[in-house]
Amino acid sequence: MPRELARGVTLLFTPLTLRGTTFANRAWLAPMCQYSATDGSPGDWHLVHLGARAAGGFGLVIAEATAVVPEGRISPQDTGLWDERHVAQWARITDFVHARGAKIGVQLAHAGRKASTHRGFDGQRGSVPLDDGGWETVGPSASAFPGLAEPRALTAEQIEAIPVAFAAAATRAHRAGFDVVELHAAHGYLLHQFLSPLSNDRTDDYGGPLENRSRLLVETVDAVRAVWPSDKPLFVRLSATDWVEGGLAVEEVGLVAKELGAHGVDLVDVSTGGNAPASIPVGPGYQVPAAREVREASGLPVAAVGLITDARQAEAVLVEGSADAILLGREGLRDPFWPLRAAHELGVATGALPAEPGTADVVEGTSATGWQAPYVRGAWT
Ligand SMILES: Cc1cc2nc3c(=O)[nH]c(=O)nc-3n(C[C@H](O)[C@H](O)[C@H](O)COP(=O)(O)O)c2cc1C
């Protein structure tokens, strides 16, 4: 059902509260690997990348796929939270983001059979050789992602260690000041590899029917929820479809999402694909129908992502009831100040911009931003 709104009010700039955490608006920055870390350590680049988007008005910025163990990195240049030294490095960034009035999440990840790959912008593709800083990868089964090295199938004992590693990273994420943990169970990385019949040939409790294929994800959610504070939201990113006959389909993913809700997940970030080469009908808002289906099937709040680039488009996705929040990826890279521009276009006074005395950042509308409180954020009047 489309939601009814009072005149001059937008959903995009209406706060959202999950557990004890309130996001000032629903324009959020999607997690995006920067491939710029050394030994998992975020640095100045990450501070500027995430800090600029917080200053630009995003209500939540989600730090990139951050490895829970070194061998879980997509590339040698990924960020991590597997070591105590990462806590203080991230805390510098979370402090800066909080001072701008935004919330910050981290996407915890294990890349499984898609780990140890070249970062892409060095002109090299595929797996990094073992003698050039690469490492042996693991997965549910010894079947390679096309073009990458063959992984080793995880033993039952090694599977047990995965939720433990995620929980330890979540504990560090809390101490580093993150407001949200998102588990990366999409795009063909380890948790998705277990979920999808395309990459999981196991015959034990972790393979076969959906209940078994989702076991590692549910166990990981339980382990993280047990250590992640009860007032902080837990998100999961899922690929709602593999876009391949015989692969994961949205009906199954809706069931998984519902189960995750029963285990304390607060929001599903609905993406698609990444576990197999596929022909994907990419276009504006192409993943929004999947977000809507997962929302309806699970009863959970969802975030929509994928070629949502325009303020009115984003607002429409929320108003039509397809999603509860909007994540921007590439458009957020092009325009760190997208939310401020969107607010201006939608006639919303954000109070986020410095203003000359007597001027207003919205000419027609509700309150204008006076010079008295030029830098106050979070008051989306
Ligand atoms: C440079 C780059 C890095 C990305 N890294 C991640 C990542 O770390 N984790 C993830 O789940 N998705 C990642 N993505 C996917 C984005 O989060 C997003 O889902 C995708 O770009 C589609 O949204 P968009 O059309 O707004 O860009 C990345 C995308 C880009 C462009």
Image (cartoon, rainbow, N blue to C red):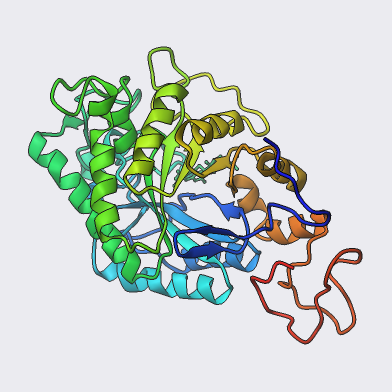
- Front-lying residue, 253 or 142: 253
Q: Is residue 347 left or right of residue 25?
A: right
- Rendered location of residue 81, percent (x, y): 30, 60
Q: Is residue 32 left or right of residue 145?
A: right
In the displayed structure, 372 sits above or below 365; it is: below
- Rendered location of residue 83, percent (x, y): 23, 63
- Rendered location of residue 144, percent (x, y): 27, 25
Query: Which image quadrant is residue 79 in?
Result: bottom left
The residue located at (62%, 30%) in the rendering is 286
In the displayed structure, 171 sits above or below 276; it is: below
- Front-lying residue, 182 or 80: 182
Name the quarter where the N terminus is drawn: top right
- Front-lying residue, 66 or 245: 245
Q: Is residue 98 left or right of residue 67?
A: right
Q: How many numbered marks, from 0 up?
A: 0
For the question of whether residue 130 can be seen, the reply is yes
The residue located at (23%, 47%) in the rendering is 71
Query: Which image quadrant is residue 348 in?
Result: bottom right
In the displayed structure, 81 sits above or below 360; it is: above
In the displayed structure, 379 sits above or below 328; it is: below
Name the quarter where the C terminus is drawn: bottom right
Query: Which image quadrant is residue 25 in?
Result: bottom right
- Front-lying residue, 324 or 72: 324
The residue located at (16%, 31%) in the rendering is 152
Q: Looking at the image, which residue sits at the far bottom?
A: 372
Q: Looking at the image, which residue sits at the far top?
A: 245
- Rendered location of residue 370, percent (x, y): 82, 81
The residue located at (29%, 65%) in the rendering is 172
For the question of whether residue 69 can be seen, the reply is no
